[in-house]
Image: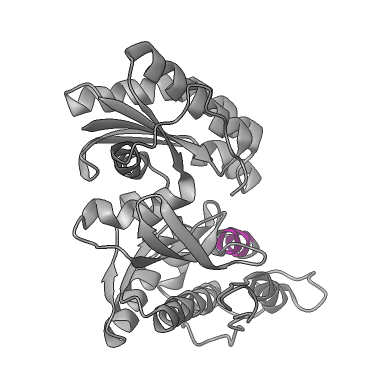
Amino acid sequence: MRVLGIETSCDETAAAVVEDGHRVLSSVVRSQDALHAPWGGVVPEVAGRAHVESLGAVVEEAQGRAGAGPEAVAVTSGPGLVGSLLVGVAWARAHAWALGLPLAAVDHLESHCYAARMDHPDLAYPYLALLVSGGHTAVYLCEAPGRQRALGRTRDDAAGEAFDKVASMLGLGYPGGPAVERAARGGDPAAVAFPRPLPAGGPHGLDFSFSGLKTAVLYAVRGQDARGTAASSGLPVADLAASFQEAVVDCLVARALEAARRTGVRRLALGGGVGANGRLRSRLVEAGGEAGLDVRLPGAALCTDNAAMVAGLGYHLLAAGRVAPADLAVRPRG
């Protein structure tokens, strides 16, 4: 089955055609980074309007590259920005209705957890998924396509949001994740002893927290009155970036390994935009290997928001008979 995937949950306009849940025939992503850079973050109204302007052309390009028409449609219905989601869901509903195709409603977080199976279709259930993005940081137990449960979530900031804020503090620009990673390559990850917060709460004691780490970077950069600058701190920006990145990676890897220890599940996948971070990927493979885990990483293009993972998961939902209603509504909250 060829599935056309539509993804507009935040600020990437994406469409893809995927066959049988993992064979990518086409994948097109139109970034809005340049539109949001002046504000240092995503402006919801700007994102929604950009989707309206771009989605038709993006879908047309994806279908043209695939060389064959879709037999079904899958769309991200939530969570995400309500205005952005409305554009994608309205378009997918109309397209599916006009062509008489079945429609699948895909959860954005579940699609990120599924992304590793796009490159590794032999990844068997159950497996753990470490999801790290700009809006979410969590570890999940994935039991079947579209069936997963959270073992731990962030209590405050997501890791990707912390990267954006720290990049702003250091004057590195937007988006913050790639900017911090580039700056960190020339720095000493042990230069600044930033905290590694690992809160003990949550139903499984596997929650995350990054607001305190973000504040620690603020004080290191600007002093306790938060009035200074990165230059006046006397610390090289590269060392600050590397030390911050190492602290985030330490927390993420520690939680993933602890989840494996507590559940006994030996398979671990990575997902979300921060999953493209090279330091996180190498540390997760190294530490996971030492712990006897089978670690599967999706390609970097499948970490950031894309429609291929939406179409891939949508295939399995439709195969299980989970067809969305014609009046499918968006679900902004997770």
Q: Residue at x 18, y 23 (%)?
A: 68
Choose between 85 and 326: the one closer to the eye. 326
Residue drawn 62% across the image and 71% down it: 210
Start-end of magenta stretch? 161-168
Q: Nearest the camera: 176 or 150?
A: 150
Residue occupying the far top of the picture: 98
Going by the image, does 133 lie left or right of 14?
A: right
Q: Position of residue 70 (x, y in %)?
A: 25, 24
Residue 320, above or below 142: above
Q: Residue at x 59, y 39 (%)?
A: 331
Relative image position of residue 319 (x, y in whole percent): 28, 39
Of 253 and 139, nearer the camera is 139
Q: Is residue 220 above or below residue 46?
A: below
Q: Position of residue 15 (x, y in %)?
A: 35, 32
In magenta segment, residue 175: no
Query: Which SS type dominates the magenta stretch?
Result: helix
Residue found 59% across the figure and 73% down from its top: 207
**Within the image, what quadrant is residue 316 found in?**
top left
Lateral position of residue 41 relative to residue 222, left or right: left
Q: Is residue 163 magenta?
A: yes
- Locate the N terminus by quadrant: top left
Which residue sits furthest right? 225
Q: Looking at the picture, how far across and down is residue 198, in whole percent?
A: 59, 81
